[in-house]
Amino acid sequence: MRKSISFFLNGEKVEVEVEPHWTLLYLLREVLELTGAKEGCGMGECGACTVIVNGKAVVSCLFPVMEVEGAEVWTVEGLAETSPGGLHPIQRAFIESGAIQCGFCTPGMIMSAKALLDENPNPTEEE
């Protein structure tokens, strides 16, 4: 049975009908057609599906969709859409340093880096 949830996605309020067993990744990709987050392993290990929920990096392939009720969710698409010039500085840095690779897992790495830098603007190399 579908349930209605509302949350903020990339700065915009979203109201959507979901199946309680869905993951956040399923909602983002299959319903909302935001394909930046990828399903790599489906077990929360690879990080290709990483998005930010309430300021924390989460693996969306395991994140229950019902837990985004009232939350603030950011995807890699939102970084580009809300940044002057079309790319967030982290996205630009990945391009300039050649860190894009094939691009499959890059969105997850970018979102993990964003969550880290939002929490700690001057991380150590170990962090």
Image: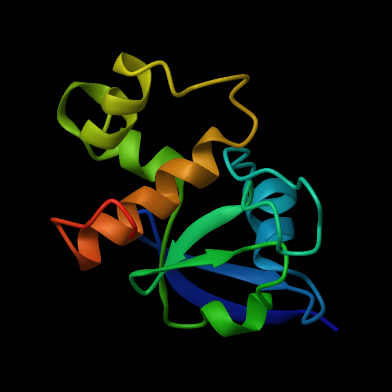
**Residue 11 appearing in the image:** no
Residue at 68% across, 47% down:
29
Q: In the depicted view, which residue is nearer to us: 9 or 16?
A: 9
Q: Quadrant of the C terminus?
A: bottom left
> What colour scheme has been applied to the protein in the rendered image?
rainbow
Residue at 43% across, 82% down:
70
Residue at 63% across, 63% down:
60
**Residue 77 appearing in the image:** yes
In this rendering, the answer to whether 33 lies above or below 50 is above
Q: Quadrant of the N terminus?
A: bottom right
Quadrant of the rendered structure where residue 20 is?
A: bottom right
| Side (left or right) of 64 relative to 125 | right
Extreme residue toward the right, this view: 1
- Image spot of residue 95 (x, y percent): 36, 18
Extreme residue toward the front, this view: 126
In this rendering, the answer to whether 51 lies above or below 89 is below
Residue at 81% across, 52% down:
41
- Image spot of residue 115 (x, y percent): 34, 60
| Side (left or right) of 126 relative to 107 | left
Q: In the depicted view, which residue is nearer to us: 57 or 125?
A: 125
In this rendering, the answer to whether 14 lies above or below 105 is below
Q: In the depicted view, which residue is nearer to us: 85 or 109?
A: 109
| Side (left or right) of 60 relative to 120 | right
- Image spot of residue 124 (x, y percent): 22, 57
Quadrant of the rendered structure where residue 121 is?
A: bottom left
Q: In the depicted view, which residue is nearer to us: 11 or 127?
A: 127
